[in-house]
Amino acid sequence: MNGVLERTLGLLELLSAHGEGMELAAMADQLNIPRSAVHRLLADLIRCGYVRQTRDHGDYVLTTKLVSMGLSFLSNTGIVDVAQPLLDRLAEISGELVRLSVVDGERLTWVARAQGARQGLRYDPDMGNDARLSCSASGLAWLMALPDDAALALVSKQGLGMPDDYGPNAPTSLHAVLEALHAARARGYSLTQETFTAGLNAMAAPVCLNGQPPMGILTIAGPTVRFTEARMLALGDELQSFAAQLAAASGASPFFNQRASAKDRQPIYAP
C-alpha cells in the first residue's frame, strides 16, 4: 500500500474486523506500512472522528461515525424499508435466520436480516460483511445466475474459502464450485451443508427481474441439527416465492431501481 488513500482505507477495513481494537504496531505489520506513516494516518482519523484511542498509547478502535454513515446510506436507499416486512414473514415461516445481501459491483454484502428462531440454537452472525462466494449459499446463488466463465472469474479473484477457515465441506477447487453452481441452477436455488460454517446449513435464491442480473440474494440459514436437507428442500418454493416478491417490490428502492429500467418491469417476475 503506497497511496495515502489506499493506506487509510486499509486501516479502516482492518479496524472494522477488530472490534476490540488493535495496537499501532500490529496494524503496521499486518498492512506492511511503516509505523510512522500509520501513526500519522491514525492521528488524522482521530481528528476527523473516525477512530479513537482506548487509552493513552493503547489500542485504536473505530468510532460509530462510519456505522452512522452506513446506516444513513441504507436508510436513503430504501432497501430495508422494502425488504424488512418480507424478511420478517419468511423468518416466521422458516423459524430460522433470513438475510438479504445486495450485489454492488463485484461484492455481495449482507445488509438486512430477520431472526425466526425463538428458542434453542440460533445462528446470528455479524452483518455488513462481504460473502465468500465459493462457499456461502448467498455467493453460490449469485454465481448461479451468471455464465460459468464470469462466475469462476469472480471466485478466482476473491479466492476460495478453504475448510480450515470456513466449513468442513467448503469446496476446495473451482471444479467443485462449478458442480455446486450447476446443481443450484437445476434446483432453482443454492443449498449448502457446512460449507460456510461448521454446524450451519443454508439455502439462497437470487432476487432479480425476469431476464435481468441479480440485484440481491435472499438466504435462510440455521443449525444443521434442525435445518436439515429435507427441511431446506421443503422450503424451496417459499424461498423462491419471497425472492420474486422482493424483486417485484424493488422499484420502491432507489438502490434496486437503478439496476433495471422501467421498461423491464413486468407484472410477473422470476427469481
Image (cartoon, rainbow, N blue to C red):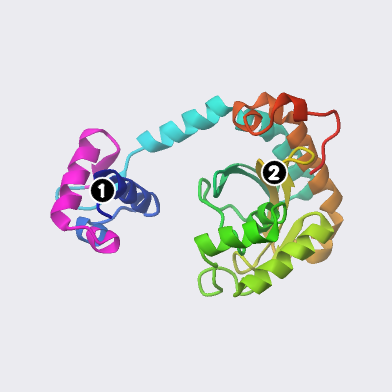
Residue 253 quadrant: top right
Contact (CB < 8 A) between labels 1 and 2? no
Q: Secondary structure at mark 2?
A: loop
Q: Residue at x 64, y 32 (%)?
A: 256
Q: CA distance from mark 1 to mark 2?
A: 34 Å
- Residue 105: percent from left, percent from top: 54, 44
The residue to which callout 2 is attached is: 213
Let me know if residue 237 appears in the view. yes
Q: Is residue 91 left or right of residue 14?
A: right
Amino acid at the residue labelled 1: Gly
- Residue 131: percent from left, percent from top: 56, 54
The residue to which callout 1 is attached is: 3
Q: Is residue 48 left or right of residue 57?
A: right
Residue bounds of the magenta highlight: 28-54
Q: Is residue 237 left or right of residue 113?
A: right
Residue 200 among magenta residues: no
Let me know if residue 120 appears in the view. no
User: Quick check: 32 above or below 77?
Assistant: below
Count residues near mark 1 (Cα–Cα under 10 Å), then give few for <14, some for 14-19, many for 20+. Answer: few
